[in-house]
Amino acid sequence: MSDLLERLRDRGWRLTAQRRVVAEVLDGDHVHYTADEVHARATDRLPEIARATVYNTLSELVALGEVLEVSTDGRAKRYDPNARHSHQHLVCSRCGTIRDVHPTGDPLTALPEHERFGFAVAEATVTYRGVCPHCADA
Amino acid sequence: MSDLLERLRDRGWRLTAQRRVVAEVLDGDHVHYTADEVHARATDRLPEIARATVYNTLSELVALGEVLEVSTDGRAKRYDPNARHSHQHLVCSRCGTIRDVHPTGDPLTALPEHERFGFAVAEATVTYRGVCPHCADA
DNA sequence: ACCCTACATTGGACATTGTCTAAGTCAAGA
DNA sequence: TCTTGACTTAGACAATGTCCAATGTAGGGT
């Protein structure tokens, strides 16, 4: 993620202070912030950044394939900067904590041809749910 | 689904016209309506049913395990009456159409112990995405 | 180094989806 | 039939996301 800004500039992205800050907030693995969480953290570094700019920038990063959009609970979408390594998610059914996980095999192969109904199936996302160790104690 | 109302009455559910209508709308397999779609269809049969009642009734049906809540796109949740047979979903990435599908094997077994991070993993939901035949033509 | 200008940002209104509450209504048991 | 606690209602409110016109600015051209 550290050379993200260079990759984006190479693709003709105009580099503004706002975009830099959003990218910095998402830097680091295993982060799954909502748009408003990104906005709150961005505001720490650039106090007047607008909510709409955060939404715009996140959408662009998703469109460029640099960030994944994850919606595990029907509430706010979360943004996952770990887009370069295929993975799935494990979600705590109590507190909502998310971890990246790596199941074995390719889930696409589990869907037989006669269950595809003529769709050009391109992707399979798996969400595992269970109680995390922290919530199990409480 | 046809004996749903009897099962619910056996569990002490108070049977009102509103609840009956919501259950009737969800009757039939392979239906994946949003709450507002359920409300629109319920209104055809019972013009003054309130939106809140539809939301309440759907939540109760989910809590009772009679209906599944599905959120495939971060937009409105959809309600799936096919809760009695385990299945997954295939979603068109253009038009959002949803089909029930039955992959082979159990996706839970694909998550090794060392990838569970101490979670008591209880469930795995898989969403397949691709372009449906209808959208491929257009 | 300084302009241009196309693209980005801003703030706030608006849209969608879902939740809550207080007051009125009714299903079902006695 | 009466009673009562559960159900329904309407509308305000909350959370999340989108849109727009006005303003600002990054980066190329000179």
Image (cartoon, coloured by chain):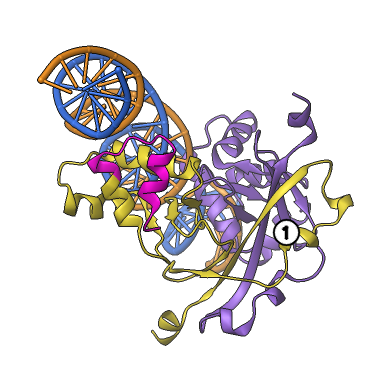
Chain colours: A purple, B yellow, C blue, D orange
Is B13 within the magenta? yes
- Answer whether residue A66 is visible to the viewer in this image: no
Q: Nearer the viewer, residue B88 or A48?
A: B88
Instruction: Determine whether D22 is above or below B31 in the image.
Output: above
> Chain ID for label 1?
A
> Where residue A6 sits: x, y (%)?
73, 59
Mark 1: secondary structure: helix
Q: Looking at the picture, which amino acid does disc 1 mark?
A: Glu
What is the count of numbered marks?
1
On the image, the x and y values in percent for residue A117 come to: 51, 81
When asked about the image quadrant of residue C13, the answer is top left
Residue found at x 41% / y 60%: B32
Magenta stretch in the rendered image = B1-19
Compared with B55, A127 (above or below) is: below
**Can see residue B47?**
yes
Q: Which residue bears the numbered disc 1?
A: A6
Q: A83 and B95: which one is in front?
A: B95
Q: Looking at the picture, tell me which residue is in the foreground, B118 or A36.
A: B118
The part of the image, by quadrant, that contains residue A133 is top right
Residue A90 lies in magenta, yes or no? Answer: no
